[in-house]
Image (cartoon, grey):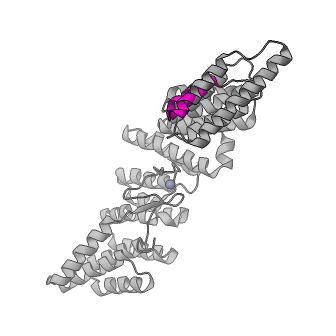
């Protein structure tokens, strides 16, 4: 709903536009302002008095006078509308501005940038893309060209045009900006996933190596390389690749545990798994690693050791996961199903399952499944497994 402040701003914008325009015309000797302004202005006021604010705004926008002195006011007004999710009105203002032959080259570029933001907000991606491509190619102002490039990258991401996004992001941008570097590595991973599924593993691997060269901390690239090694039965190679992940970013250790255990089991090497997990624990304490280690020890018949591990973990870092696992292991050890334990176990399981497993470290958005690009803030590689959700 339009508010008083906005309407006041519009009225001021019209009044100054009209006044400045009149002054200009007087200087040029082209006579007084045309009567159309006064008429629109009063029609708008009339709407306002009748509490028809939407019609008032439409009329006022129509009455806005553009001249060299009011471009700033128009730009501010357009942004105000767009920020209020009224991009269609912003679009009208900006198109109206752009149609004026009196704009300087610099002003025209700025209006075009705002216009492309309107198109983006309205979901008119093709029109935004054309405008932004023109600005990236021709804009004189360095800062404005960089802004256009950023917007174009954002748009290409939305369209899942990964290669195009890579082409638009300059090597210098990738080097200088952390977020673009992370994003570029993920675009390469996206390409690799497509190629992996369309049976071009050679190309996929090349893109994944490129992803790692772009961003050495790109966990996803090693996960994918490991999955591809796994596909072709190279389980040892898969393990080697997965083991690099905790060094890249320990927060992602929980993600590599399942494929790691799978690879060791296919090699029929549970000892190797236990050894590997102990090494991981020495490297960095992790609830998920302890859980898998306890499960594996239990599976090997080392029940006491498994229970001791979980109890120790609970002492140090109390968590719902550990309580649940302790219940499960206790019940399995007791063999005979104790009704109370079973009930408790069922409840803890429901609680464990009801919780989000991943959270964006940038904006805090939490979900069950891992998104490499946060659905809320659209940052790449900022969603992480919640290792000990009890405290996370
Ligand atoms: Zn986020």
- In this orientation, which residue lies closer to the viewer: 151 or 290? 151
Q: Is residue 3 above or below residue 334?
A: above
Image position of 188 (left or right of 324) = right
Specify the quadrant of the image occupied by residue 26: top right
Q: Residue 289 placed where, x, y %?
A: 41, 72
Q: Furthest residue to the right?
A: 27
Whether residue 241 is visible: yes
- In this orientation, which residue lies closer to the viewer: 103 or 268? 103
Image position of 128 (left or right of 225) = right
Residue at 41% in and 40% down: 194
User: What's drawn in magenta, residue-wise?
Assistant: 46-64
Q: Residue 12 placed where, x, y %?
A: 69, 34
Q: Residue 388 placed where, x, y %?
A: 42, 72
Residue at 77% in and 15% down: 32
Within the magenta stretch, is there residue 141?
no
Specify the quadrant of the image occupied by residue 335: bottom left
What is the tally of numbered marks visible in this picture? 0
Image position of 117 (left or right of 142) = left
Whether residue 297 is visible: no
Q: Main secondary structure of the magenta part?
A: helix
Residue at 64% in and 45% down: 174
Q: Is residue 382 above or below residue 37?
A: below
Within the magenta stretch, is there residue 57?
yes
Q: Is residue 386 above or below residue 275?
A: above
- In this orientation, which residue lies closer to the viewer: 210 or 63? 63
Q: Residue 141 placed where, x, y %?
A: 75, 33
């Amino acid at each position: 709903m339009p508010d008083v402040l906005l309407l006041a701003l519009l009225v001021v914008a019209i009044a100054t536009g009209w006044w400045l325009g009149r002054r200009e015309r007087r200087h040029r000797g082209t006579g007084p302002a045309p009567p159309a302004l006064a008429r629109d202005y009063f029609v708008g006021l009339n709407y306002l008095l009748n509490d028809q604010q939407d019609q008032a705004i439409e009329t006022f926008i129509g009455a806005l006078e553009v001249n060299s002195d009011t471009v700033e006011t128009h730009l501010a007004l357009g942004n105000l509308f767009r920020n209020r999710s009224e991009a269609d009105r912003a679009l009208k203002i900006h198109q109206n501005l752009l149609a004026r032959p009196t704009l300087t080259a610099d002003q025209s570029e700025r209006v075009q940038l705002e216009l492309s933001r309107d198109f983006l907000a309205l979901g008119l991606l093709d029109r935004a893309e054309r405008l932004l491509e023109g600005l990236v190619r021709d804009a004189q102002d360095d800062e404005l060209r960089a802004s256009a490039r950023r917007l174009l990258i954002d748009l290409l991401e939305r369209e899942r045009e990964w290669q195009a996004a890579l082409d638009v992001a300059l090597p210098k941008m990738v080097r200088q900006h952390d977020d673009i570097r992370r994003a570029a590595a993920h675009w390469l991973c996206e390409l690799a996933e497509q190629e992996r599924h369309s049976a071009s593993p050679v190309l996929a691997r090349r893109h994944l190596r490129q992803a790692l060269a772009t961003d050495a901390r790109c966990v996803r690239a090693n996960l994918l390389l490991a999955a591809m090694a796994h596909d072709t039965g190279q389980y040892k190679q898969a393990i080697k690749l997965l083991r690099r992940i905790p060094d890249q970013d320990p927060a992602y250790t929980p993600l590599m545990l399942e494929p790691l255990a799978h690879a060791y089991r296919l090699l029929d090497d549970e000892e190797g798994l236990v050894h590997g997990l102990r090494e991981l624990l020495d490297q960095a304490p992790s609830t998920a690693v302890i859980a898998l280690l306890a499960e594996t020890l239990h599976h090997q018949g080392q029940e006491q050791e498994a229970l001791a591990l979980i109890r120790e973990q609970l002492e140090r870092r109390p968590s719902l996961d550990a309580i649940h696992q302790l219940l499960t292991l206790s019940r399995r050890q007791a063999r005979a199903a104790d009704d109370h334990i079973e009930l408790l176990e069922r409840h803890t399981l429901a609680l464990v399952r009801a919780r989000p497993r991943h959270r964006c470290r940038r904006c805090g958005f939490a979900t069950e499944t891992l998104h490499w690009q946060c659905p809320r803030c659209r940052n790449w590689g900022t969603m992480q497994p919640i290792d000990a959700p009890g405290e996370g």
